[in-house]
Image (spheres, rainbow, N blue to C red):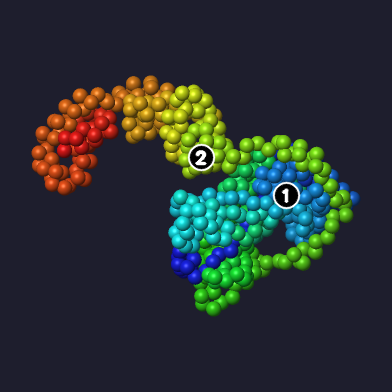
């Protein structure tokens, strides 16, 4: 199979996403009073309404309507004052009513957008991006210093109820194929679910991944969902088709169902792009179908032939009246909007002189952005300016790396406090410890729950920055290695690393490498 970079020279991928988010911060289901609780004993949170028993009537959850309006406002959507629910008919054991209550062509939230910042390696997937000059635009992108920004339209965000959970027993991978029998848990049936549908504006797997990540940040910031992809409260379907470079007509699309991680979303789309290109290059036909990404086999497999809207026989829900949202209601919800990630990143740039890259990575998680702000407060007005960049580096590199390695750990519960982070960075900025030593102190702080200055004192780490003491060592090293000095002066400037290493060895790793380098360059 061809590589993605080769495929993109001939074919243009057209990608749209359908992102489903359960409103897990609510207490009850969408149309009944059953409790929302992940991991409860199967079929313990059910009632006649969510089980679809005859005569049971739905009552809409007002808090869920507020949540979807909040999501729409946070993603630049127009809020439709008048909309209604429909019945989407399908027969499958996970939906006991044999229909799903969902919205039709007019949803609560319509015509939104998000702007993505794509840089570094992620930007390299966009075809011919280097042909553009900074500030120059093409289609929905504008070139920047580090990559480009992409404007991604949002068709709508609609409200629906989630289905139950099927559990397939037997077989190798818990899938229906090969199972001896299946069980169904209706605890999830009726959970309020919002589905965001994008315009077909995405062109690379990286753009799809970044869109999903950004949407997750927004939903977490506004507090409508825990967005746990592992537990299924945030899931994504990807629609993908190819068309020849330079043509405008869409190709036949396939749908990748239930991508449950950012990596799976990226890898699944990348494989499907390459698979479709191979089929088309060989004169084959792409069929409209739903496919499943198998991460262990690293390939997509057919699940079923894709249904069309007609197959669902949508008609207005007779048990629910149409909605008429008032201006007062919408403005009351708007007042609940917190500072969104893009706004916070912009403030970090302006208030703390951070780069756009650093600010964007700090706000990827609420815990890291809150920790950074607490560090700036602990540093005080006088020191915040000079410490903001190194503290951002500490959080983006060391703290984020440690959090990833530990899994489910809360910064509030670990030994690293904002005060300790400020002390550690302050010692490095003042040249009391080197950057390498700072990493060692960071690890010991976490392990031993001690202040950084106490660790430095205990381990004798404080860096020697006395120029006179360092000069004596430099002179000694140069005198001990006259052949290497001659080679350096003859053009082998790479030997500077050897001299620095010898000086550090004599000073037992405590010499200030910056001063050592400066003195060596002067004397050589």
Rendered-image quadrant of the C terminus: top left
Dot placed on the residue nearer the N-terminal end, 2 or 1: 1
Task: Find residue 479 and report its horizontal and vertical position in percent.
Answer: 10, 34
> Relative to the observer, which residue lies in front, 491 or 61?
491
Quarter where residue 427 is shown: top left
In the image, 524: left or right of 238? Answer: left
State the residue at coordinates (64%, 67%): 289
Give percent across and percent down for residue 6: 45, 67
Q: Is residue 150 visible?
A: yes
Q: Secondary structure at mark 1?
A: strand
Crowd rating for badge 1 (residues with CA inside 10 Å; few <14, some 14–19, many 20+): some
How crowded is the residue under tag 2: few (<14 C-alpha within 10 Å), some, or many (20+)? Answer: many
Q: Nearer the viewer, residue 521 or 509?
A: 521
Give the residue displayed 71% in from the left and 51% down from the top. Answer: 157
Disc 2 and disc 1 in contact, CB within 8 angstroms? no
Residue at numbered disc 2 = 359
* Callout 2: SS: helix
Residue 295 visible to the viewer: no
Residue at 34%, 21% in the rendered image: 457
Total number of numbered discs in the rendering? 2
Residue 454, above or below 99: above
User: In the figure, residue 508 lies in which quadrant?
Assistant: top left
* Dot label at residue 78: 1
Residue lying furthest bottom? 283
Q: Position of residue 521 (x, y in %)?
A: 20, 37
In the picture as drawn, the residue positioned furthest to the right comes out as 55
Left or right relative to 520: residue 362: right
The residue drawn where x is 80% and y is 39% is 328
Q: Is residue 305 rendered to the left or right of residue 440?
A: right
């Amino acid at each position: 199979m061809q590589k993605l970079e080769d495929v993109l020279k001939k074919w243009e991928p057209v990608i749209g996403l359908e992102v489903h988010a359960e409103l897990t911060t609510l207490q009850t289901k969408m149309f009944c009073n059953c409790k929302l609780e992940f991991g409860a004993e199967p079929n313990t949170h059910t009632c006649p309404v969510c089980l679809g028993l005859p005569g049971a009537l739905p009552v809409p959850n007002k808090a869920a309507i507020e949540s979807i309006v909040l999501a729409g406002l946070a993603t630049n959507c127009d809020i439709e004052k008048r909309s209604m629910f429909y019945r989407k008919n399908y027969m499958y054991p996970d939906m006991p009513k044999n229909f799903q209550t969902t919205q039709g062509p007019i949803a609560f939230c319509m015509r939104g957008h998000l702007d993505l910042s794509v840089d570094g390696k992620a930007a390299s997937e966009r075809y011919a991006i280097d042909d553009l000059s900074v500030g120059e635009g093409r289609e929905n992108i504008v070139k920047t210093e580090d990559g480009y920004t992409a404007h991604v339209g949002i068709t709508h965000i609609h409200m629906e109820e989630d289905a139950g959970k099927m559990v397939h027993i037997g077989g190798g991978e818990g899938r229906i194929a090969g199972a001896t029998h299946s069980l169904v848990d209706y605890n999830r049936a009726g959970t309020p679910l919002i589905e965001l549908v994008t315009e077909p504006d995405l062109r690379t797997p990286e753009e799809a991944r970044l869109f999903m990540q950004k949407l997750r940040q927004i939903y977490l910031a506004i507090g409508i969902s825990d967005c746990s992809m592992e537990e299924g409260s945030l899931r994504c379907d990807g629609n993908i088709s190819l068309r020849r470079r330079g043509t405008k007509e869409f190709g036949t699309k396939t749908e990748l169902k239930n991508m449950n991680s950012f990596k799976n979303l990226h890898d699944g789309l990348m494989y499907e792009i390459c698979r479709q290109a191979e089929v088309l290059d060989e004169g084959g036909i792409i069929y409209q179908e739903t496919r499943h990404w198998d991460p262990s086999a690293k390939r997509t497999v057919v699940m079923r032939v894709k249904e069309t809207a007609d197959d669902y026989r949508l008609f207005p829900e007779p048990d629910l009246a149409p909605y008429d949202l008032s201006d007062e209601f919408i403005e009351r919800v708007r007042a609940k909007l917190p500072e969104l990630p893009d706004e916070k990143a912009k403030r970090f740039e302006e208030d703390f002189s951070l780069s756009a890259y650093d600010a964007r990575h700090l706000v990827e998680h609420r815990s890291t952005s809150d920790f950074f702000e607490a560090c700036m407060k602990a540093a005080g007005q006088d020191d915040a300016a000079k410490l903001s960049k190194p503290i951002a580096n500490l959080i983006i590199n060391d703290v984020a790396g440690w959090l990833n390695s530990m899994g489910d750990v809360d910064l509030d519960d670990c030994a690293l406090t904002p005060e300790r982070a400020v002390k550690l960075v302050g010692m490095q900025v003042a040249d009391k410890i080197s950057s390498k030593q700072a990493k060692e102190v960071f690890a010991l702080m976490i392990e031993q729950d001690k202040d950084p200055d106490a660790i430095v004192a205990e381990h004798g780490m404080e860096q020697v920055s006395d120029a006179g003491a360092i000069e004596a060592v430099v002179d000694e090293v140069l005198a001990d290695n006259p052949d290497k000095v001659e080679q350096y002066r003859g053009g082998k400037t790479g030997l500077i690393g050897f001299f620095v290493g010898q000086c550090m060895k004599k000073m037992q790793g405590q010499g200030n490498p910056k001063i050592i380098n400066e003195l060596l360059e002067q004397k050589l």
